[in-house]
Amino acid sequence: MSTQLVQAVWGGILFGSVYGLMALGLTLVWGAVRLLNLAHGAIFVVGSYVAYFFVSRLNLPILVALPIGVLAAAAFAYLMHLTFIRPVIGKPGFDNSTLIATVGISIAVSAAAILIFNPEYKVIPPVITGNFTVSDVQITKQGLLVIGTSLALFGLVYLFLTYTRQGMAIRAVSQQQEAASLMSIPVVRTYGMVIAISGALAGLAGVLLSPFFFLNPNSGFNPMIQALIVTIFGGLGSVRGALVAGFVLGIFESFVEVYYGVAWAQPGVFLLIILMLILRPNGLFGIGEVRRL
Amino acid sequence: MLEVRGLVAGYGGGEVLHGIDLFVNEGEGVIVLGPNGHGKTTLLRAITGLLPPRAGQVLLDGKDITHWKAEAIAAAGVIHIPQGDLLFAEMTVTENLLMGAYHGPTWSERNARLGRVYELFPWLKERGGQLARTLSGGERRMLALGRGLMSKARLLLIDEPSLGLAPIITQQIYASIHKVKQGGMSLLIADENANHVAGLADRVYLLETGSLVREGPADELLRDKALLESYLG
């Protein structure tokens, strides 16, 4: 196999799983809460910095710091729910005020990261080190871990939503909120749970990705934008859509990059999105207003 | 068990209910009869917390539940089967039913209740794996009823059980509600057709433009054709 092809496929699958992992959290929150969480990248950063702190300042192994970072991200997301989301649920202006609030949180988080740490790039060690080569392309074990984790989490989230009482309740709330409350499902608490889960996913993505992209106060921004694109491409609110779209876009971007150069990668992706939205305005797995999660 | 005192409710600037007083005793079948647009749905929504009342009180076993959340009222056993069924469209029939038993029980208890509901509506069992949005109108109504019965209901509030259904299915629906009542369930049914509810009703209220204008035992009121005709047309 040619080096170029292997490079394109490997990069595509790796990017795809990363995009998917970020998009999964976004799409869950959109599907259940109808919240476009523009703080998703900030939550990613919170998880990463907390893990970084435990690794570099307290010298804990990354395997200990990882779950702490994930929990911190979940806690931060839940705190955001309590302070900025919950007070406006069901009130007019929910969309605008939560959009502004989540953008504000993003700015505050990156400013806080600069103040507490500094604007320099930080390194989080990979969970597993080592690599091997296939046709001159370096395959890192951490990359394989990211792909495996992403796929496993999609599987877990699917099983959770399909077979558990809480997971079913999330779908119920997202499909018919009034009926859900008549079934005594605590709607607002369910929202909080979804936001916390989404936060944990973002935090995990942050800790696992920082060995590739390095960590800085704004390093959550790009993954979030990519995830937003994936989410729109796959159909806002669709878990399956996030998975498929993550890989489609990741592989597409990687092939464009390898064969036509980095400069074409982003324009190529946007062109694909525009075509897609012309053909299927609701995205790949077009979940309209009524059909969700 | 349920008592409503001076209930006032409405939407936006408009007032729909102008001070409703009613009660339902344990095991009783109470019907609120009234033409469309006179406040039946609003009444049920105000009782079960979907529409916060503006004034008045809702008491359950003497306890004031007026300002409880819908979730809490449902958890207390007051189960509202709403107009339009409000099914979880992208969930299967079985999943919809399981959501009815969200509060409280263990999985074994939930499955036992599932068995009982399937006994009452064998039709639903055959459709178990089908998505709710693919059901016909009659099946949807059965599912909505079944979902309500999955809870630990003490009092069922049913909003127009026959709305939009073919006569033969209407009969089946009322027959199954009858079975539920024979099992000792208390009922508060909003309806616009006196004939449908004749077998279920112990007591009847007549609702007109947001006020209860008559109250009495069913066998007395429902027999008074002239009175019913003047109210229901």
Image (cartoon, coloured by chain):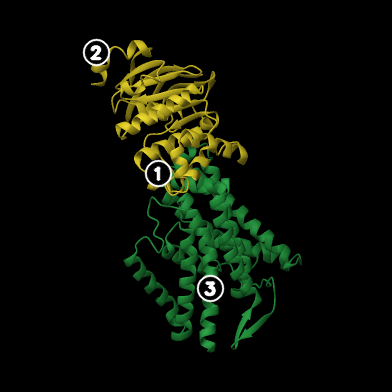
Chain colours: A green, B yellow
Q: Which chain carries label 3?
A: A
Q: Can residue A198 be seen in this view?
A: no
Cα separation, mark 2 vs mark 1, equals 47 Å
The amino acid sitting under disc 3 is Phe
Is A269 rendered above or below residue B182? below
Is A270 rendered above or below residue B22? below
Q: Specify whether A76 is left or right of B59.
A: right
Of badges 2 and 1, nearer the viewer stands 2
Q: Cβ–Cβ below 8 Å for labels 2 and 1?
A: no
Picture coordinates of residue A244, whole percent (x, y): 47, 67
Where the N terminus of chain A falls, by quadrant? Answer: bottom right
Q: Residues within 10 Å of mark 2 (few under 14, many from 20)?
A: few
Q: Is residue B190 visible?
A: yes
Question: Badge 2 is on which residue?
Answer: B226
Q: Which chain carries label 2?
A: B
Return the residue nearer the eye: B184 or A230: B184
Of badges 2 and 3, nearer the viewer stands 2
* Both labels 2 and 1 in a single chain: no
Q: Reading the chain from its start, which is encountered first: label 3 or label 1?
A: 3
Q: Residues within 10 Å of mark 1 (few under 14, many from 20)?
A: few
Is B113 rendered above or below residue B7? below
Q: Cβ–Cβ below 8 Å for labels 3 and 1?
A: no
| Residue A15 - label | 3
Residue drawn at the location 43% of the way across and 27% of the way down: B177
Q: Residue furthest top?
A: B220
The amino acid sitting under disc 2 is Ala
Question: Badge 1 is on which residue?
Answer: A92
Cα separation, mark 3 vs mark 1, equals 38 Å
Picture coordinates of residue B103, whole percent (x, y): 57, 37
Label 2's element? Answer: helix
Picture coordinates of residue B221, whole percent (x, y): 33, 12
